């Protein structure tokens, strides 16, 4: 076993603190990487505080990982020592079911292995994430990083990027569509960049008036303050799509009223409490309320290549590892511009 340094929550809601733990020895198809940067996703906070009720502790969060390959197993073909690579939200899956065959490992029928707060495919060994100095991952779950982009800005693409790219592609959002992005945080700011890059008319729906100028710089054509009734009324029945990235419970009925007939409200934000929805708000206007989970490995590579070709990165604030609890508190207040990324040299 290989001794690894990280930051962990020892139990639900206990502040993260330094922790040494063991990772497996390198298998023939494994890649070992020294972690350079790790993004901070709101899912890290939800899980470290066990808000979804599925926490495995001690927990080392982090699934937006950029690292340099330090060793490769004997059979590894796609990577060599010194390569800069990425690891996202998944480190394994059954590889046999229909979804795995289609590159949709996130929907693996036998249960994928999440990068942290998950289990390896033996269904007993816990996984530990990127708030650590080193990780070992099967080469099939390691991604190539475009060479022309700054690494801090690439780390968040591994979750915030793919989670917004995937549904926009699945529902073929582009030219001629009016799309609203709900919530301007880590996911929201990537959604604005992708939706405008795909040619849609993009409106930012936000609770924070102070984010308007940034939203426009990121590519939004319009900005609507959701706490201002008149501004909301002006966009009733206006949108083809809403991409909802909000992390806290909110009023879905209100946002459904902003959709056209046949409009689609896509949930990627995962609030930790259930919400009631009035069926009539779907019925009147044949509207759809749908969801989407991260993205599979082939699509994540496609998204990274797209970002390389179109110079798309995340706007980041680089932090020290010991700033993590403050970063979480700021995230809860909506004070993220627009993704915290941990410089792992500070571990
Ligand atoms: P984040 O950076 O904290 O951004 C969330 C944004 O939502 C905030 O900046 C804020 O934007 C808005 N917001 C927060 N509380 C709100 C409230 N009560 N009412 C209305 N708006 C509110 O979080 P993130 O990292 O982007 O993650 C967002 C959510 O997506 C989390 O629940 C996370 O777990 C989930 N997630 C899901 C997937 C998936 O596969 N589906 C993957 C990754 C993350 P404004 O200031 O603009 O209002
Ligand atoms: Zn995430
Ligand atoms: Zn599978």
Image (tube, grey):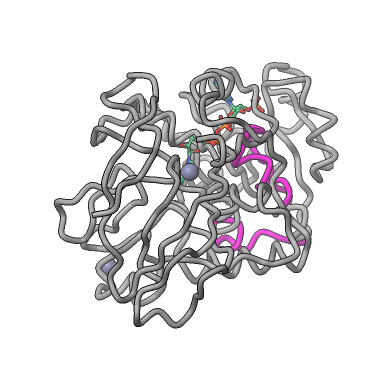
Of 10 and 309, nearer the camera is 10
Q: Residue at x 36, y 38 (%)?
A: 60
Query: Residue 102, image x and y in percent?
Result: 39, 75
The N terminus: image quadrant: bottom left
Q: Residue at x 70, y 31 (%)?
A: 337
Indicate the quadrant where residue 277 lies.
Answer: top left
Q: Is residue 183 magenta?
A: yes
Query: Residue 2, image x and y in percent?
Result: 29, 53
Query: Residue 31, image x and y in percent?
Result: 40, 67
Task: Identify the magenta region.
Answer: 167-193
Of 149 and 251, nearer the camera is 149
Q: Residue at x 39, y 25 (%)?
A: 16
Where 224 sits versus 298, above or below? above
Where 146 sits versus 313, above or below? below
**In this picture, residue 129 sits left or right of residue 156:** left
Q: Residue at x 65, y 28 (%)?
A: 336
Query: Residue 14, image x and y in percent?
Result: 33, 19
């Amino acid at each position: 076993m290989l001794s690894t340094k990280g930051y962990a929550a020892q139990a639900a809601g206990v502040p993260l603190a330094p922790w040494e733990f063991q990772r497996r020895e390198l298998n023939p198809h494994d890649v070992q990487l020294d972690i350079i940067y790790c993004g901070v996703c709101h899912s890290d906070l939800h899980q470290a505080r066990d808000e979804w009720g599925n926490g495995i502790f001690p927990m080392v969060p982090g699934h937006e990982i950029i690292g340099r390959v330090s060793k490769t197993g004997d059979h590894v073909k796609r990577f060599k020592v010194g390569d800069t690579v990425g690891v996202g939200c998944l480190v394994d899956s059954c590889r046999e079911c229909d979804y795995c065959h289609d590159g949709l490992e996130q929907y693996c029928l036998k249960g994928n292995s999440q990068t942290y707060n998950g289990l390896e495919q033996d269904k007993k060994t816990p996984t530990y994430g990127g708030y650590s100095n080193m990780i070992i991952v099967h080469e099939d779950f390691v991604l190539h990083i475009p060479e022309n982009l700054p690494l801090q800005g690439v780390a968040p693409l591994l979750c915030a990027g793919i989670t917004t790219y995937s549904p926009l592609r699945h529902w073929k959002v582009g030219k001629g569509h009016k799309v609203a992005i709900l919530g301007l945080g880590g996911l929201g700011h990537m959604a604005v960049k992708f939706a405008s890059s795909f040619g849609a008319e993009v409106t930012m729906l936000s609770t924070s008036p102070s984010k308007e100028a940034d939203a426009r710089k990121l590519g939004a054509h319009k900005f609507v303050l959701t706490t201002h009734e008149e501004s909301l009324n002006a966009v009733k029945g206006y949108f083809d799509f809403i991409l909802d990235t909000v992390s806290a419970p909110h009023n879905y009925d209100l946002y459904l009223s902003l959709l056209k007939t046949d409009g689609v409200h896509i949930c990627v934000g995962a609030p930790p409490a259930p919400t009631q929805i009035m069926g009539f708000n779907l019925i009147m206007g044949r509207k759809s309320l749908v969801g989407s989970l991260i993205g599979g490995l082939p699509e994540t590579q496609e998204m990274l290549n797209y970002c390389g070709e179109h110079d798309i990165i995340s706007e980041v604030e680089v932090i020290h590892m010991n700033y993590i609890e403050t970063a979480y508190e700021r995230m809860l207040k909506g004070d993220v511009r627009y993704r915290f990324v941990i410089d792992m040299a500070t571990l």
